[in-house]
Amino acid sequence: MKVTAIIIDDERLARKELRSLLELHSVIEIIDEAANADEALAKIHEKRPNLIFLDIQMPGKTGFDLLEELDYIPEVIFTTAYDEYALKAFEVNALDYLLKPIEEERLKDAIDKVVEKIELDDEPTSAAGILTENDQVFVKDGDKCWFVTLKDVRYFESVGNYVKVHFDSNRPMILKSLNNLEKKLDSKTFFRANRKHIINLRWIEKSETWFNGGLLVTVNGEETIEISRRQAAKLKDMMSL
Amino acid sequence: MNKKLLYWAAQVFGWTTYIGLTIILNIGSEELDTEFFITMVSVWVMGLALSHLLRFIFIKQGWLEMGIFKILPRVFLTIVLFGIGMEILYYLSQLTISSEPATLNSQQLFSETISWSFLFLIWSLFYFAFHFFQNYRKEEIKNLKWEASKNEIELNRLRAQLNPHFIFNSMNTIRALVDENPKKSKDNITKLSKILRSTLLSGKKKVIFLEEELSLVKDYLDLEHSRFEERLNIKYNIDSETLKLNIPPMMLQTLVENSIKHGISKLPEGGVVEISASIINQNLSINIQNSGKYEPLGKNQSNSTGFGLGGTIKRLELLYGTSGIFEIYNKNNKVITKLIIPQTISDESNSNNH
């Protein structure tokens, strides 16, 4: 198995240095390099690498800005000279970062971890543009950041121009519209319950009939979401198949 | 000053004055006999002893550290008790000294007790007043010393800042250059060493020659040029007459670092840094122009690891008062940083160094 990777760093010599360190790791295949966030955005979209090595401090947009703009998030190993503090933003997720100049031992550990993770996610990534439940998204709310695997999301809730992402005990807001989100999510797992909610079908614990032929589903014990009449019919249809 | 000696001198002086005054006031009355003098001596001894005991109580009970409202009732009560004690002692001494039979006149006992208490009140007032005055001066001296050492520490802190981001990125660049350009990697190691050395030593001098500061800045910019490559263009415009003028160490360096950190490193296509130095009205005038945009109180300042502009302003003020000038503003898509350094401070160690 080969892990495809893109190196993202604004300094040519830093990219070169990482490339030469990676020569020892035949499992990693470097398919491209990018010198800034915009270049990286296009290349990740086009080449869909398994992994990116991402410098945080870059001119124009930072590494975090890049992650926020990505729909498809590969595995990420951050590289940084000094911004350990910036990585403290990640509270829940174990994530990996390398301090420059990079120690060979640390690099090896980080690669081993990523390879293991990629092998575990046996389900192949679906057709371009659609996010399956094993894909992860990057969510940033204020100072906090998360990598969220979609199967952990119970439901998305529309609040004004934002969408609240409900997972674990967190509910950060992202600036997206529910309609756009619906188009990107895998419809086998994520179902548009009503005007304001998209729910993850795997989290539904029970459903009962509600007014006007609608349904009331219970998610995670006490959270209940109403499914409109029209959508309820659709859901019954899907389930009966 | 020996506090103990002062205390005893004041004690002896105070009580002797009291006795002296009593004697003077009694001149002319027929009471002025041997008996009276013996009484006076015994009062002197008893007063001294009791007031010394009073001081002992003040200190042991920690009343000197208490607030005024806590002290007042305690001291008042103690003084009354001491007045009574003094009166008892006085009465007993009269029994032995006086040839006349002692009489127990309650009104006289009462008025004497009051006057003894009053005496101890005055004594206490003096004691506390002196103590508070001393304390106040001590506090003031402590404050002054603290202020001075704070300024000293502050100055050193402002001098010895080096952006860790820069160091680690430079190291990383050097690692890459070892393969690509061994000669350049060696040069860069030397330059980085020189920078580290001047940073470490800069705390020792108030000012250095501009040429020394410039050689540091050049090393620094060469290293940054290795990192940013064609994205960083450097221009110097240095009047040769300014080379022997004085500048606080690391001051220009810090501003140049800022121009890279908030300027060039933020621009994907890079830009220019231009450093000019000239003499204006016998002061050293420095001008840095860099591509980019200065954003006062921008997001980037709050999480910056260096100390930046605030530190420079503070340092100028500490060294030159109001005659040092610092300005930063945007003009034609460039950031202009101006610095005017008076030549009022010189470092004696400077001349011995060459």
Image (spheres, rainbow, N blue to C red):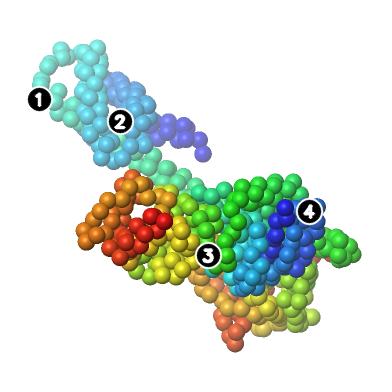
Q: Name the residue under label 3.
A: A130
> Do marks 2 and 1 share a chain?
yes
* Chain on which label 3 sits: A
Give the x, y percent position of residue B151.
56, 57
Query: Residue at position x 39%, y 45% from top?
Result: B133
Give the SS element for disc 3.
loop
> Do marks 3 and 4 share a chain?
yes
Residue A26 is marked as 4
Is residue B36 visible to us here? no
How crowded pointer 1 is (Cα within 10 Å; few <14, some 14-19, many 20+) is rated as few
Query: Residue at position x 80%, y 59% from top?
Result: A20
Check disc 4 and give the amino acid type. Answer: Ser
Q: Which of marks 3 and 4 is nearer the N terminus?
A: 4
Q: Mark 2 points at which residue?
A: B19
> Do marks 1 and 3 share a chain?
no
> Which residue is the extreme one toward the bottom?
B332
Is there CB contact under 8 Å for labels 4 and 1? no
Mark in the foreground, 2 or 1: 1
- As drawn, is B288 to the left or to the right of B330? right
Q: Distance between the residues labelled 1 and 3?
A: 108 Å
